[in-house]
Image (cartoon, grey):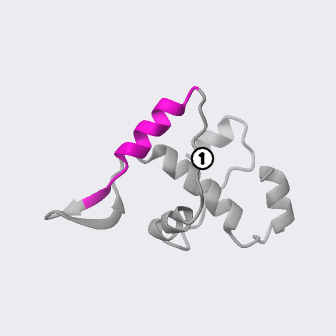
Amino acid sequence: MVKGLRKLGFKNATKIKKTRSVMFWLNSMKKKKIHIIKNHLHEEATKEQQNYKMKEIAGIAINQPIDKWNHMWDAARYGHIMHNQEPGIYETKEEVIKRINY
């Protein structure tokens, strides 16, 4: 995916290190108020939100999202990670905030 983004002109695309679990970041996002704005993607975003579920084993939900209705949430989680991660070796927190205009 990173190679594809770089081919599209995103020179600074890098792989995010998974220092914390997916569930850590999803639980962190649950503490925030998330707004789904009405635009051309509103119906798709709402459909993903309504169908987003965790995998089940013998009827018991486990802490792993089903990989079907999570595309929008993955993108939101990546943005949340970038905003909340510690400054990297290459950028200060101010540079990250300025770059993503958060």
Up-down relation of residue 26 to residue 53 (above or below): below
Q: Quadrant of residue 38?
A: top right
Q: Is residue 77 left or right of residue 13?
A: left
- In the rendered image, the residue lying farthest to the top is 40
* Image vertical order of residue 58 relative to residue 13, above or below: below
Which residue is painted at 75% across and 70% down in the image?
88
Residue tagged 1:
35
Q: Residue at x 47, y 65 (%)?
A: 22
Left or right of 22? Residue 81 is right
Q: Secondary structure at mark 1?
A: loop
Query: Which residue occupies 72% across, 42% down?
Result: 10
Q: Nearer the viewer, residue 47 or 81?
A: 47
x%, y% of residue 29? 55, 62
x and y percentages locating residue 36 in the rendered image: 57, 42
Tag 1: amino acid: His
Residue at 86 percent across and 64 percent down: it is: 94
Between 36 and 21, the one nearer to me in the picture: 36
Give the crowd class for mark 1: few <14, some 14-19, many >=20 residues within 10 Å.
few
Q: Is residue 91 visible?
A: no
The answer to which quarter of the image holds residue 17 is: bottom right
Q: Is residue 33 magenta?
A: no
Count every numbered label the image shows and give the total.
Answer: 1
Percent x, y of residue 4: 59, 40
Q: Main secondary structure of the magenta part?
A: helix
Q: Is residue 79 above or below residue 41?
A: below
Residue 1, given in percent of the width and then of the height, sits at: 55, 46
Q: Is residue 52 visible?
A: yes
Residue extending farthest to the left is: 58
Q: Which residues are magenta?
A: 40-55
